[in-house]
Amino acid sequence: MLNARRQPTRYGVLIRKEARDSPHKIDLAVCLIGARHVRRLVLASPDWAKRGRKRTGKLRLFT
């Protein structure tokens, strides 16, 4: 995560490595962005709203 850098462009903000030939990886940051995007798509979909579940914002863990 710490190796990812934001780069503003005229189309928006991109995520990049420090340098093109840098050996450091940014895979985790890219996966995090993709997962958050999919979550937002699911929560905004009409099928999810039809389920009738209330979103309380609480995280429930069962151990």
Image (cartoon, rainbow, N blue to C red):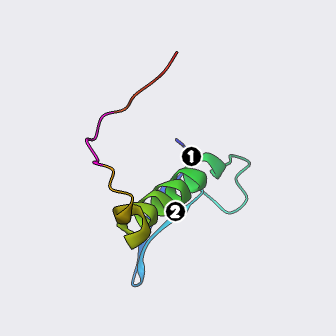
**Residue 53 or residue 57, whichever sits in front:** 53
Q: Is residue 38 left or right of residue 46?
A: right
Q: Look at the image and tell me whether residue 6 can be seen.
A: no
Q: Which residue is mark 2?
A: 15
Residue at x 39% of width, y 58% of height: 51
Q: Residue 17: horizontal and vertical position, in percent?
A: 60, 57
Secondary structure mostly seen in magenta is loop
Name the N-terminal-most of marks 1 and 2: 1
**Residue 57 or residue 26, whichever sits in front:** 57
What segment carries the magenta color? Answer: 54-58
Q: Residue 47: horizontal and vertical position, in percent?
A: 43, 68
Q: Say which element carries label 2.
A: strand
Vertical side of 48 occupied by 55: above or below? above
Residue 52 shown in magenta: no
Quadrant containing the N terminus in the rendered view: top right
Q: Which residue is mark 1?
A: 3
| Occupied quadrant, residue 45 | bottom left
Q: Residue 19: horizontal and vertical position, in percent?
A: 63, 59
